[in-house]
Image (cartoon, helix red, strand yellow):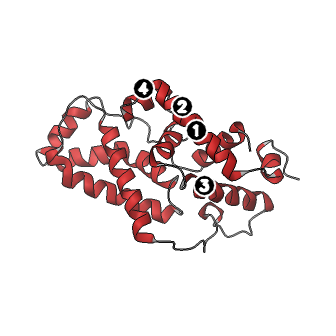
């Protein structure tokens, strides 16, 4: 597979995940954090509403099913509430702190899961109708993509999700991860190269991504 085919798969994955709520970005995140640290439950709820879908999308790209992603997401926000009293507002993005918690929870998920098997079809295929060949191919492609991504280093996965699912610029990713733009571009290239090797060549995938579903 080529880089464009890999990023095309990432775009399909992104389209299957929930978008942020309109107007979800608060005017003053730091003020919300201070209020939450003082026990303001509405401030905690506001932080949750702002970031929950981003964290869910991140988890959904890295764990096998939507129910697993929901569990990881819920755990992230439990950990956030527990750690919030000690959080220091330094000017670093709060979102970056949440992504670090999420990465840790994903790692714990796999440690606890210990090879649960590949017993389920991609959950996006679940409906009352018999899945078409096109949808079966899409589900298999996305499952293969997730499995391949799980073999990448954690930072490589995070950068791919931020770039091609969250659609963040290289500069935004660099700021969130505390990396240089050059480093982000280099890691992205290595991650895509590795995925290209792992996913190999699949003619059905290529036809699907080009819009030919015969």
Where disc 4 sits, the SS reads: loop
Asked whether the residues under the numbered discs 1 and 3 touch, taking CB atoms below 8 Å apart as contact, a structural biologist would say: no
At which x and y percent is residue 17? Answer: 54, 50
Whichever of callouts 4 and 1 sits on the residue coming sooner in the sequence is 4
Marks 1 and 3, how far apart at CA: 14 Å
Does residue 2 lie above or below 71 as drawn? above
Q: Is residue 10 rendered to the left or right of residue 180? A: right
Asked whether the residues under the numbered discs 2 and 1 touch, taking CB atoms below 8 Å apart as contact, a structural biologist would say: yes
Q: Nearer the viewer, mark 1 or mark 3?
A: 1
Where disc 3 sits, the SS reads: helix
- At a point 43% along the width and 45% down the height, the residue shown is 54
Where disc 2 sits, the SS reads: helix
Disc 1: which residue: 190
Marks 3 and 2, how far apart at CA: 19 Å
Disc 4: which residue: 180
Marks 2 and 1, how far apart at CA: 6 Å
């Amino acid at each position: 597979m080529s880089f464009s085919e890999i990023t095309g798969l990432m775009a399909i994955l992104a389209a299957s995940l929930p978008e942020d709520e309109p107007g979800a970005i608060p005017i003053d995140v730091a003020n919300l954090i201070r209020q939450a640290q003082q026990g303001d439950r509405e401030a905690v709820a506001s932080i949750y509403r702002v970031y929950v879908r981003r964290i869910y999308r991140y988890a959904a790209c890295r764990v096998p099913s939507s129910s697993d992603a929901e569990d990881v997401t819920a755990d992230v926000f439990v950990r956030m509430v527990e750690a919030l009293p000690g959080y220091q507002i330094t000017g670093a993005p709060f979102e970056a702190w949440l992504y670090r918690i999420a990465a840790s929870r994903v790692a714990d998920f796999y440690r606890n899961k210990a090879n649960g098997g590949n017993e389920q079809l991609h959950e996006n295929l679940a409906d009352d109708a018999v899945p078409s060949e096109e949808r079966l191919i899409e589900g298999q492609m996305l499952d293969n993509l997730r499995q391949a991504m799980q073999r990448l280093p954690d930072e490589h996965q995070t950068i791919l999700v931020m770039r091609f699912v969250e659609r963040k610029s290289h500069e935004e990713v660099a700021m969130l991860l505390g990396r240089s733009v050059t480093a982000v571009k280099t890691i992205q290239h290595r991650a895509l190269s590795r995925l290209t090797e792992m996913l190999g060549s699949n003619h059905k995938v290529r036809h699907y991504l080009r819009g030919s579903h015969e």
